[in-house]
Amino acid sequence: MESTSVVIIGGGVLGASVAYHLASMGQKDVLLLERNNLATASSSQAAGLMFQVSSKPAVDQLSRRTFEVLSTLEKITDEELDFKSAGTLRIAEAVGEKNNLNALYKRAQNEGVSAEQVSEKWRLEQLPWLKSGSDALAVYFQDEGYIDPYRLTNAYAKAARHYGAKIKTGVSVLSLNTCNGKISGVETDTGQISCDSVVVAGGSWSNQLTAPLGVPLPMIPTRSHFWIAAPDENFGPDQPMVVHADAGAYTRPEVGGLLLGVQEAQSRTFDYRKLPDDILSFAVTEEGSEWDALIEAEIRIKSFFPGLENAGFESYMAGLSAYTPDGHFILGPVDKVTGLHVATGCCGSGVMASGGIGEALAEIIIGGTSKYDLCAFNPERFGAIDPTSAEFQMLCAEARARKSK
């Protein structure tokens, strides 16, 4: 029987980050298992937005670690990650949204995050396609940007190998083994592996492993998607990202075009028990309905993007994000099973928080505690839940619908 100290299940951006941070901190015998290839599920289908400050301060502490670790990964791997430091323009027009943005602006100033209010003239010069009221509150966060999640995942993995971690793809974990309430190993399609600790970082599939142990995770696989408009003279590659609170939409540059994401009134959710092993064989969006959510949000979006109808959208990307009712991650040790840790429930923010998530889990596994305050992410914070119930699915769908960047 194969033996190791820590098994990480899931080769997405979170699992790879945990592997890197564990190995770089000196943890011996780290093994990451992925049944497909690295970054082939949610990580490869993410927009890759990275914010220094957001509506969730608990997430921001983790996200800022990701910004810090990028240059380290580049040095270790000798490869450029090509982080696009475009900055983010956040816009609010309604009174309530202005109050929220103003609070975010003040918090950024207090926490040393670069932010400045910008004029209507500035907005027109930087984003000629953008329409906003003259009395809109617009704040530019200079040091934010976006990254290719696939490249980031593989950078974590390469750096993890550099420090001695082992990564095996094409290996499926069938179940978790326990003895007297403690993790004793994992059962794979190639045999048993004994270990002292397990990190479940399987995204929307994580409940397939934890629920049989009486540990249902409070999250639901939920559709996330965006559209990409064809290149246009109005969409410059150096334009900032845009988050428009009133419209419930965001944009970022995309190879001369424009990537557009929107909040849905009713997000589509799925039963984790019915997910296939390979997401590529699963229709997250039914054929022919790729534009439904965009049509539904058209009135809201046209208020700031009047050229929507003629934008020439030619690509659509849909994937799964695991959402919780409060929009926070599921992160840390599970009290019910000693040695079991989880890093999932990304709520569409896993890429930007991956650095902090990996470091926090590594600190806990090696030393028992973390410098990060993880109270908001406690895996058992909702008490007894049933992630297969219609009621719980609705709570998570509503969290996706009201998500604020």
Image (cartoon, rainbow, N blue to C red):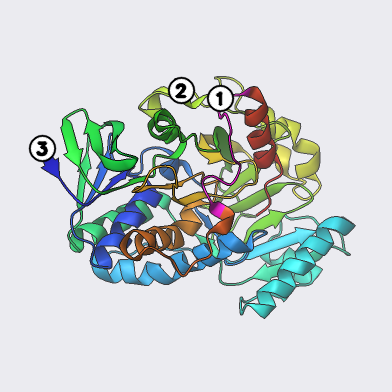
Name the residue that disc number 2 marks.
Answer: 273
Which quadrant, please, contains the C terminus? bottom right
Side (left or right) of 197 relative to 348: left
Most prominent secondary structure in the magenta stretch? loop
Provide the secondary structure element on which disc 2 rests: helix
Residue 164 seen: yes
| Residue under the point 50% across and 63% down | 62
Residue 263 seen: no
Name the residue that disc number 1 marks.
Answer: 388
Q: Position of residue 372 (x, y in %)?
A: 49, 66
Q: Nearer the viewer, mark 1 or mark 3?
A: 3
The amino acid on which the numbered mark 1 sits, given as a three-letter code, is Thr
Q: CA distance from mark 1 to mark 3?
A: 35 Å
Provide the secondary structure element on which disc 3 rests: loop
Q: Position of residue 281 (x, y in %)?
A: 39, 23
Labelled disc at residue 173: none
| Residue under the point 74% across and 55% down | 130
Q: Is residue 117 above or below residue 329?
A: below
Q: Is residue 5 above or below residue 186?
A: below
Side (left or right) of 368 relative to 64: left
Name the residue that disc number 3 marks.
Answer: 1
**Nearer the N terminus, badge 1 or badge 3?**
3
Q: Tell me the magenta residue range.
A: 377-389
Q: Is residue 373 above or below residue 178?
A: below
| Residue under the point 62% across and 23% down | 289
Provide the secondary structure element on which disc 1 rests: loop
Q: Are marks 2 and 1 in contact (CB under 8 Å)?
A: yes
| Residue under the point 36% across and 39% down | 40
